Image: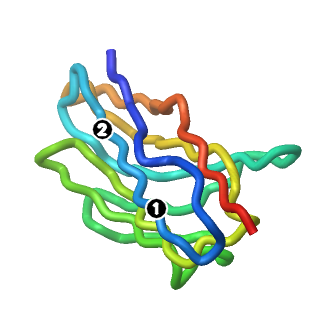
């Protein structure tokens, strides 16, 4: 069993910053791709940013230049630095990871989410 726990959400004014963190724990052999997703009210969940084990990153167009994803494999963590936040960034943010629980088995896990609210 693997658990992902997000932290760092909250209420911030437009133009402000937040840093989200996600820690994975449990029977972890190795973590491959990690990512952040979000679901805004009345909208579908969307991929915000992803990072491979090798460090290759990918961003949603609307957050490029404002958000930065990073990971620290020794601590099984992935972070999302969010700057110049806009009201449109308001959503529940979810951590996601592809986790190998042994040499041959990989599963995809989700965190429960953390609320980010940006006031105008």
Callout 1 environment at 10 Å: few (<14), some (14 to 19), or many (20+)? some
Image coordinates for residue 118, horizontal then vertical, percent? 67, 61
Figure quadrant of the N terminus: top left
Image coordinates for residue 46, horizontal then vertical, percent? 69, 53
Pick whichever of labels 2 and 1 is earlier in the sequence: 1
Residue where numbered disc 1 is placed: 18
In the displayed image of the protein, which residue is found farthest to the left?
74
Image coordinates for residue 70, horizontal then vertical, percent? 32, 63
Identify the disc placed on residue 88. none
Observer-nearest residue: 48 or 30? 48
Q: Residue at x 75, y 69 (%)?
A: 120
Q: Residue at x 60, y 74 (%)?
A: 63
Residue 42, by quadrant, is top right
Badge nearest the viewer, 2 or 1: 1
In the displayed image of the protein, which residue is found farthest to the right?
42
Which element carries disc 2, helix, strand or loop?
A: strand
Way the structure is coloured: rainbow
Image coordinates for residue 111, horizontal then vertical, percent? 48, 32
Q: Gap between marks 2 and 1, in whole Å? A: 17 Å
Residue where numbered disc 2 is placed: 23
Q: Is residue 27 left or right of residue 66?
A: left
Q: Is residue 76 above or below residue 71?
A: above
Which element carries disc 1, helix, strand or loop?
A: strand
Q: Is residue 12 above or below residue 39?
A: below
Q: Is residue 10 left or right of residue 55?
A: right
Q: Residue at x 27, y 42 (%)?
A: 31
Q: Is residue 40 above or below residue 17?
A: above
């Amino acid at each position: 069993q693997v658990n992902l726990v997000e932290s760092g959400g909250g209420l911030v004014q437009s133009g402000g910053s937040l840093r989200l963190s996600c820690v994975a724990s449990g029977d972890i052999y190795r973590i491959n791709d990690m990512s952040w997703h979000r679901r805004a009210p009345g909208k579908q969940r969307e991929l915000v940013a992803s990072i491979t084990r090798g460090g290759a990153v990918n961003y949603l167009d609307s957050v490029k230049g404002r958000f930065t994803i990073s990971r620290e494999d020794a601590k099984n963590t992935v972070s999302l630095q969010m700057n110049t936040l806009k009201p449109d960034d308001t959503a529940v943010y979810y951590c996601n990871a592809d986790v190998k629980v042994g040499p041959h088995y990989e599963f995809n896990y989700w965190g429960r989410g953390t609320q980010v609210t940006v006031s105008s």
